[in-house]
Image (spheres, rainbow, N blue to C red):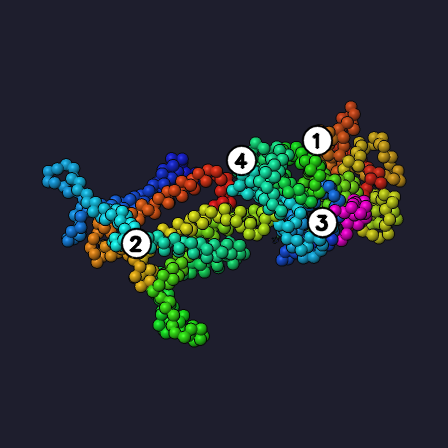
């Protein structure tokens, strides 16, 4: 497949500045197709995130870029150079491993210096020393230069691994779940630190993660992967607001998905009481099977019978009645699970200020859910 | 249900005692006995020595009369080192034993490392088969295997290898394959190789593959990766394997005797001769004591080295073991 039509898909490629170009990369292990015909263009200095659930082939794709895995098919071109015939140790890429893979028998210093000693023409001892000091300062690990990896905390090891992969000034920095080993608190703080650092160094970076928040926080663009395929490429906003398939819609955030067949500009839908009015610009033929995705924050909730901004009978509005089945109060907003008459549950995120001074609906209350047709996204796959 | 604490504690105590009891019974006591014999005076009797202490009738403590002649003999040889014409039979036996053991260890390491590396890098299913093959020789008697080498290497036209060479027209006359130092070394390396391969394998199989990938990713060529990452991380395996080969190889005398034709005396052979035909038990015992002392020194050193190393590589020791 191709990352069709997204605005983000060939950002860079269109402007003629694709720095890294992956064309039809494919890798098969025995009976699993780990990476399936992935094409991607990435601009210089971009921070790109590969996002997908466990086992979808993110690491494999990254390892192909590093030269640790030989693609069965496809091309990888970095800065005009076809990497196919370049072995791992000659590629201008450096990788930070999911497990950090620091050399346990070397000090922090020696770990960072390792790559520098491999440079040809050789660097002098003074040059290596200066560069190591610079790198350790960058990640604020100067004080630990003489320690061995096992004498460091997880976060410190992560910084050393980062320093080691940056030391050689790679053309392409590959980060495989760089923060996975950290606990949630530190991870969130480190995400921004890491982005700042990468931007300061100015290196092109592909990072792999299965955490959508991490991808959205850190990357300028995201590629969503599933079962070896690259399903969608775009900015975090594009991917969230205009998913191009059900997987992306459900994987990134929460959504309400309705399935049905197109019949005269609306969707005849089994699990919604009325035909669903489709967004006006959806170009669909009658009889097509499609899905409509509506984000919970686009769904408004009102007490049954109360006046609502979504006037019943508005041709541009989808609405249905039901009762509150579940509420999760999350401070700034509450997540309402509303069970419609036919049993289908619709999720609505309601800002806490929405109810003003009036009491908010509670379990069992009769309510009405509604959304404007243009807020739904039509998905054909 | 959990057993009460004190039962566990007591159980641990007894289990902890077991190795000590074992060492006492099968090392310390016999060694004390050997030391006693080494300090005795040879005599035509049964047993053929006078113990170094005698109980005078009526005395409370035994009277000590150690005879240091055997040690003096070894000491004199050491002093005579370098003077021409000196009788250095013990020292030269020591020398050839150490040399043979060192060469055996080195060759076992050079041959065994690729063996172990290859097995450790094989697929899991293949690994067990390959390990079985390494251990297969243990299923037949050690002596039988040495005799088999004698049949193979036999220097007449009847020797298996010679027959092959003659039949292939590669040589005109049978080669002198047996009864030389090459044959001894071959037999030694052949016999001791598994003791090198197994600890090396156990070490290399734990080597984190990602460290090698990281090295390559950082620009190290395969050779550099081996020297800077694989080799240092397998140091403990190398040490363990080398000790398992070197220590028994020093005392080995059956293989040199059978394959070397007995013109080079090993220190083990000297002990055998002194205990047997020469009936000089104190001398044999004194030599045995020196062997233990000489071999213990490197073990203690390595142990101490390993301890400091263990402290500095603590949590990641798995990778380095
Ligand atoms: N060396 C290998 N041999 C066989 N199968 C492999 C190998 N490496 C990966 N695979 C398979 O390829 C698929 C993709 O693996 P990959 O490691 O790329 O997943 P991932 O997206 O990085 O997952 P995670 O988020 O769990 O790290 C998986 O099904 C995995 O089992
Ligand atoms: Mg992975």
Q: CA distance from mark 4 to mark 2?
A: 48 Å
Question: Circle 2 sits in a helix, a strand or a loop, which is it?
Answer: helix
- The crowding category of the residue bearing disc 3, from other C-alpha atoms within 10 Å (few below 14, some 14 to 19, many at least 20), is many
Circle 4 residues within 10 Å: few <14, some 14–19, many ≥20? few
User: Quick check: marks 1 and 4 in contact, CB under 8 Å?
Assistant: no
Q: Which residues are magenta?
A: A1-19
Question: Please, which chain is the residue tagged with disc 4 on?
Answer: A
Judged by depth in the image, the label closer to the viewer, 1 or 4, is 4
Looking at the rendered image, the disc whose residue lies closer to the viewer, 3 or 1, is: 3
From the viewer's perspective, is B71 left or right of A167? left
Residue on which disc 3 sits = A78
Q: Is residue A154 magenta?
A: no
Both labels 1 and 2 in a single chain:
no
As helix, strand or loop, the secondary structure at mark 4 comes to loop
In magenta segment, residue A16: yes
For the residues beneath circles 4 and 3, the answer to whether they share a chain is yes
Q: CA distance from mark 3 to mark 2?
A: 66 Å
Q: Nearer the viewer, mark 3 or mark 2?
A: 2
Please give the label number shown on residue A146. Answer: 4
Q: For ligand 1, tell me if the residue under mark 2 lies within 8 Å.
A: no
For image coordinates 64% across by 42% down, the residue present is A168
């Amino acid at each position: 497949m191709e990352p069709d039509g997204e605005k983000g898909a060939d950002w860079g490629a269109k402007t003629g500045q694709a720095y890294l170009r992956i064309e039809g990369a494919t890798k098969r292990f025995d009976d699993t197709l780990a990476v399936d015909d992935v094409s991607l263009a990435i601009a210089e200095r971009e921070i790109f995130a590969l996002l997908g659930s466990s086992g979808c082939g993110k690491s494999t794709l990254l390892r192909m870029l590093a030269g640790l895995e030989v693609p069965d098919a496809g091309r990888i071109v970095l800065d005009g150079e076809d990497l196919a015939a370049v072995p791992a140790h000659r590629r201008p890429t450096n990788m930070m491993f999911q497990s950090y893979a620091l050399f346990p028998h070397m000090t922090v210093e020696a770990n960072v210096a390792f790559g520098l000693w491999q440079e040809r023409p050789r660097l002098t001892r003074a040059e290596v020393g200066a560069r190591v000091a610079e790198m350790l300062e960058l990640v604020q690990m100067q004080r630990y230069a003489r320690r061995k990896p096992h004498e460091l905390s997880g976060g410190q090891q992560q910084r050393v691994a980062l320093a080691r992969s940056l030391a050689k000034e790679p053309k392409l920095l590959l980060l495989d779940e760089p923060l996975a080993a950290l606990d949630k608190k530190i991870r969130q703080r480190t995400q921004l630190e890491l982005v700042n650092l990468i931007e300061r160094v100015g290196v092109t970076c592909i990072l792999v993660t299965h955490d959508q928040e991490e991808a959205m926080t850190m990357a300028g663009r995201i590629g969503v992967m599933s079962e070896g395929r690259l399903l969608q490429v775009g900015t975090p906003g594009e991917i969230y607001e205009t998913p191009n398939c059900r997987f992306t819609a459900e994987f990134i955030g929460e959504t309400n998905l309705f399935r049905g067949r197109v019949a005269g500009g609306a969707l005849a839908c089994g699990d919604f009481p009325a035909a669903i009015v489709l967004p006006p610009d959806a170009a669909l033929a009658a009889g097509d099977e499609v899905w409509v995705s509506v984000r919970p924050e686009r769904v408004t909730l009102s007490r049954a019978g109360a006046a609502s901004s979504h006037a019943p009978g508005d041709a541009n509005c989808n609405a249905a009645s039901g009762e509150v089945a579940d509420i999760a109060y999350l401070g700034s907003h509450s997540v309402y699970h509303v069970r419609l008459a036919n049993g289908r549950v619709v999720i609505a995120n309601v800002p806490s200020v929405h109810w003003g001074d009036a009491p908010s609906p509670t379990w069992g209350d009769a309510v009405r859910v509604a959304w404007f047709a243009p807020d739904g996204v039509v998905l054909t796959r | 249900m959990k057993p009460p604490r004190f039962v566990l504690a007591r159980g641990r105590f007894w289990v902890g005692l077991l190795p000590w009891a074992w060492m006492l019974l099968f090392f310390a006591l016999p060694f004390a006995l050997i030391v006693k014999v080494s300090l005795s005076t040879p005599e035509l009797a049964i047993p053929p020595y006078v113990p170094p202490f005698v109980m005078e009738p009526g005395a409370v403590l035994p009277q000590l009369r150690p005879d240091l002649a055997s040690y003096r003999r070894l000491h004199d040889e050491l002093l005579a080192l370098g003077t021409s014409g000196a009788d250095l039979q013990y020292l030269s036996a020591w020398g050839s034993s150490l040399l043979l053991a060192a060469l055996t260890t080195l060759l076992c390491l050079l041959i065994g490392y690729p063996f172990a590396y290859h097995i450790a890098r094989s697929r899991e299913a293949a690994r067990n088969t390959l390990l079985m093959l390494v251990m297969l020789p243990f299923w037949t008697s050690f002596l039988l295997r040495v005799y088999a080498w004698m049949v193979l290497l036999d220097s007449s036209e009847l020797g298996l290898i010679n027959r092959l060479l003659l039949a292939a027209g590669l040589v005109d006359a049978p080669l002198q394959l047996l009864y030389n130092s090459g044959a001894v070394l071959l037999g030694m390396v052949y016999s001791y190789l598994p003791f090198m391969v197994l600890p090396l394998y156990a070490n290399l199989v734990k080597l984190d593959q990602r460290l090698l990938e990281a090295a390559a990713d950082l620009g190290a060529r395969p050779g550099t990766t081996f020297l800077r990452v694989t080799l240092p991380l397998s140091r403990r395996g190398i040490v363990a394997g080398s000790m398992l080969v070197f220590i028994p190889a020093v005392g080995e005398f059956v293989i040199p005797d059978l394959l070397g034709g007995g013109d080079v005396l090993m220190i083990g052979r000297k002990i055998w001769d002194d205990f047997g035909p020469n009936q000089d038990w104190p001398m044999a015992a004194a030599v045995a004591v020196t062997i233990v002392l000489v071999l213990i020194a490197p073990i203690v050193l390595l142990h101490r080295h390993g301890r400091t190393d263990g402290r500095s590589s603590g949590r990641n020791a798995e990778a380095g073991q």
